[in-house]
């Protein structure tokens, strides 16, 4: 089975807010779907956390390398693409695009063998996993009401992030976390994401340490992106001193970037994003590395239904990965798949057992949000 062509379609019209200082608009494109078409008619699906113009340009550069390649060898083909792209830079739009290609090739391999991707990754440790509802912070009462509405849908774990947190004063931060804990209840997991990868983040180590102690008072399960994403030494010290676990890594790409952070014990929880980091092949290697260093692997998943499906398959293949991120309120997750996603009575999400990623895209909805029928 050979790769005939790779197509892409950017999603627009309902792009959710990111909480960024340069806020996203609904018509902005930050998520692009990929479809790998083969000479036998089979199609694999991938997702890229990058604007479609950048993905399209990257595909044009990569085409001589992937056209005619074996579509059933994701790790080898992905590594070939990586090895031949060093001279164009590592970790940018091309690496993100390779991520989507890799996800799609794993989808194809699963479909060809009749197996879910998680089994091809070595075996399924679980058939379902707990999704945590990922929502933006707001002023306390609005956040409280939002969280209660999300909890009513069956979620038992929640992450609040970005927004005003760390951007005004300590009293505001306390009020936000207090309102969140009251809304979700003592029995629910609650995580906090400062979003320190935002442009011109103003807080530093002392703020992060003081805030971590406040978060411990509200039984917060982890403190995410508490520091600027390049502050390795500060992360190492914060992880040592913080009473709550420290999480991060969503902006890093490729395993080589993660290695110094894992070796330095900068994280308690590492969070690579499969749609940016290099795909399933690369994320699996990072997760193995994390295991060897005693670091938990919980995927970052602020992307699409295809990205969520990849995260679910990865979660099935790692014994300690008991959570996946679920971006609530995004049509690019909730509306573009046939059948959608449903939580069970325990607030758990079934990991698809169908071949490949185990999902089918709703072509009409994809066309609606991409204004294109070219993907398929």
Image: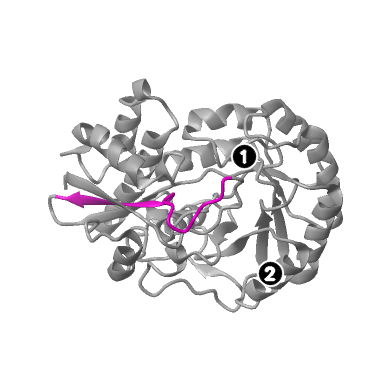
- The number of callouts visible is 2
Q: Secondary structure at mark 2?
A: helix
Q: Which residues are magenta?
A: 22-38
Quadrant occupied by the C terminus: bottom left
- In x, y percent, where is residue 119? 40, 55
Q: Residue at 79% x, 58% y: name it.
A: 177
Task: Looking at the picture, tell me which residue is in the foreground, 282 or 146.
Answer: 146
Does residue 81 appear to the left or right of 48 in the view shown?
Answer: left
| Crowding near the residue tagged with mark 1, few <14, some 14–19, many ≥20 C-alpha atoms within 10 Å | some
355 shown above or below 7: below
The answer to which of marks 1 and 2 sits earlier in the sequence is 2
Q: Which mark is residue 357?
A: none
Label 1: state its secondary structure.
Answer: loop
On the question of residue 116 being in view, the answer is: yes
Point out residue 11 in the picture as x, y percentages from the top left corner.
Answer: 38, 57
Up-down relation of residue 341 to residue 313 (above or below): below
Q: Is residue 58 magenta?
A: no
Image-quadrant location for residue 241:
top right
**Is residue 278 toward the left or the right of residue 73 in the image?**
right
Question: What is the crowding at mark 2: few (fewer than 14 residues within 10 Å), some, or many (at least 20)?
Answer: many
Q: Is the C-beta separation of discs 1 and 2 under 8 Å?
A: no
| Disc 2: which residue | 147
Q: CA distance from mark 1 to mark 2?
A: 24 Å
Is residue 360 among the parts visible in the rendering?
no
Q: Is residue 36 magenta?
A: yes
Q: Quadrant of residue 82?
A: top left
At which x and y percent is residue 209? 82, 39
Left or right of residue 219: residue 369: left
Q: Residue at x 35, y 72 (%)?
A: 338
244 relative position to 147: left or right: right
Residue at mark 1: 197
Q: Nearer the viewer, residue 225 or 139?
A: 139
């Amino acid at each position: 089975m050979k790769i005939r062509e790779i197509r892409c379609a950017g999603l627009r019209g309902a792009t959710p807010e990111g909480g960024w200082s340069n806020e996203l608009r609904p018509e902005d494109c930050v998520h692009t779907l990929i479809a790998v078409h083969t000479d036998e008619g089979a199609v694999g699906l991938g997702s890229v956390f990058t604007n479609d113009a950048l993905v399209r340009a990257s595909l044009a550069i990569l085409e001589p390398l992937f056209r005619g390649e074996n579509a059933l060898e994701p790790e080898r083909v992905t590594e070939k693409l990586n090895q031949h792209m060093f001279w164009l830079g590592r970790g940018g739009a091309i690496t993100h695009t390779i991520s989507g290609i890799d996800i799609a090739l794993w989808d194809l391999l699963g479909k060809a063998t009749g197996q879910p991707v998680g089994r091809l990754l070595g075996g399924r440790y679980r058939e379902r996993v707990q999704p945590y509802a990922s929502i933006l912070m707001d002023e306390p009462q609005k956040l409280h009401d939002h969280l209660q509405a999300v909890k009513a849908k069956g979620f038992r774990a929640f992450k609040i992030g970005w927004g005003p947190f760390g951007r005004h004063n300590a009293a505001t931060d306390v009020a936000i976390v207090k309102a969140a804990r009251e809304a979700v209840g003592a029995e629910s997991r609650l995580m906090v994401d400062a979003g320190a990868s935002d442009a011109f983040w103003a807080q530093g180590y002392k703020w992060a340490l003081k805030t971590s102690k406040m978060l411990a008072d509200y039984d917060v399960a982890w403190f995410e992106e508490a520091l600027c994403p390049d502050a390795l030494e500060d992360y190492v010290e914060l992880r040592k001193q913080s009473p709550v676990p420290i999480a991060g890594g969503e902006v890093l790409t490729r395993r080589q970037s993660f290695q110094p952070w894992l070796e330095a014990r900068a994280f308690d929880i590492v969070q690579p994003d499969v749609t940016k980091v290099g795909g399933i092949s690369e994320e699996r290697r990072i997760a193995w590395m994390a295991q060897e260093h005693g670091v938990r692997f919980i995927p970052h998943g602020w992307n699409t239904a295809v990205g969520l499906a990849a995260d679910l398959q990865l979660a099935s293949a790692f014994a300690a990965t008991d959570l996946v991120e679920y971006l609530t309120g995004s049509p690019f997750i909730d509306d573009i798949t046939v059948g959608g996603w449903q939580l069970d009575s325990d607030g758990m999400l079934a990991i698809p057992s169908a071949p490949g990623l185990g999902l089918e895209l709703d072509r009409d909805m994809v066309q609606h949000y991409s204004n294109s029928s070219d993907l398929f």
